[in-house]
Image (cartoon, coloured by chain):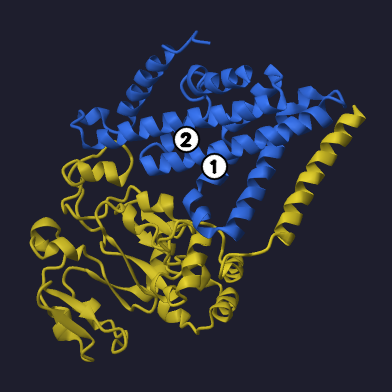
Amino acid sequence: MNELIAIFLGLVLINNFLLVRFLGLCSFFGVSTKLSNAVSMGVAVTFVMALASVVTWIIRHYILIPFNIEYMNIIVYILVIASLVQIVELFIKRTNLALYNAFGIYLPLITVNCAVLGVTLINATEDYSFLGSVAAALGGGLGYTLIMAMMSGIREKLEMANTPKTMKGIPIAFIIAMLLGLAFVGFVGMI
Amino acid sequence: MTPIIGVLTVIGLVCGLIIYLVYIKVPRRVKGIEKTEELNAILPGMNCGACGHPGCFAFAQALTADPGLITKTPCATMLQDLEKLKQLEKALGITLDASAMLKKALFHCNGNSEIICNYSGVNTCKAAAQLLSGYKKCPYACLGLGDCVKVCPENAIYIDPEKKVAIVDTEKCTGCGLCVPECPQDLIELVPAGTKIAFQCNYKPLRDVPGREKCDFGCTHCRKCFKACEYQAIEWHKEKALPEFNQEKCTLCLKCIEVCPQNTLADFTKAKKAAEAVTA
């Protein structure tokens, strides 16, 4: 149990996907302009991460390792994640249109999000157990959502602030990202 | 080597099969989703956004809720394809008058305004328009740097290299309206495809600034066209001080074009020839 908590907290705070591992950065700047959008993106990422971890764990342990082709994991994982997202999108579209509209473009965007591929590859290299990889996925997703919410909250306030003309928009967002990253360096070495 | 290829092929096939099975088997629980999917299959699927919706599926959703929306924000690509339009009519259960809905882009500038300085900045109209309202004598003139050309999905817009003015090939133009927000001078208007006389001057600001001071070829509000028309096809808009053309009464006698001292009017039905003359 302690190990699971360590994996979970480690990915939320210490090895955060966005600020420490630098994965999924395009959506970090692209979708973090409004708090509501950022949170729904975070929820979608967490959901897909958890699903992808479960499926890729099964594939890794029952197909890749017995056939001795673990080095092909990137290709297989990309294929599996892409089909998984397609299936989930199709499913949501037909059962809950309101949820589909809320996810909007984010669900297909996640197909090519490196944070999702990253969590499955970390599961493989660290050789986590089944529950461990689920914990890693949930931790990674929560960490992603946390940073997205923080960033979008700050950026929403910044819209009102009197920033210099040359710094408006993306430049000030990069500086904010740097300050957030510095703050998260403080967690390094906790576990 | 061979088992690897075999295993990867099997994984790929299984993924494809699962998607196919999900597509076939998952019940459609959302009300009206069959209709939305049917409409989505008919729509072009380019997701160009010209109808004002974020994509073809969103447009299909909006159409499911309100079939009358097709006349308000028509899909320009659909209007070109009569066969698809018939399918859409069938799916929506209404009849459409495609010729009345079809629009074309009209540029309200004849490009005769003098070039008063050499512009060598960033090669877009938006950049040029920010510097003293452009490099032409008329601050409302077409700058001819081709912001509209870049967005046109049909390659229907050309730039006259001498006059530096955009010209539309009305045959290629689908009236999608993607160019309208691109123009920093606000020169482009979507007009019905049957428009006969084109008023080629940026009329919106002209109300305050008489054309003659700014551009030697702008509308001077002389009313000559209004007086010359024998068929009462031109009405004089008092507030704008501009001619308004009644397309039904107009017989294309072209008298108004002849009398216009400023070359502001043009035969819109021959816009394709004008475009050909530039490209040739």
Does residue A30 show up? yes
Q: CA distance from mark 2 to mark 1?
A: 9 Å
Q: Residue at x 47, y 79 (%)?
A: B98
Q: Above or below — where is A75 with respect to A71?
A: below
Q: Image point 69% across, 44% down: which residue?
A: A83
Local packing at callout 1 (Cα closer than 10 Å; few below 14, some 14-19, many 20+) is some
**Colour in which chain B is drawn:** yellow
Q: Tell me residue A115's x, y (percent).
A: 56, 30
Residue hosting label 2 = A27
Whether residue B217 is visible, yes or no, is no
Which kind of residue does numbered mark 2 sit on?
A: Ser
Residue at the outermost front position: A1
Q: Which mark is residue A47?
A: none
The residue located at (52%, 24%) in the rendering is A17
Q: Residue furthest top?
A: A189
SS category of the residue bearing label 2? helix
The reply to whether callout 2 and callout 1 are in contact (CB within 8 Å) is yes
Judging by the rendered image, the residue that carries numbered circle 1 is A109
Q: Earlier in the sequence, mark 2 or mark 1?
A: 2
**Residue at the extreme right:** B2
- For label 1, the SS is helix
Quick check: do tags 2 and 1 share a chain? yes
Query: Looking at the figure, which quarter contains the N terminus of chain A?
Result: top right
Q: Which chain is blue?
A: A
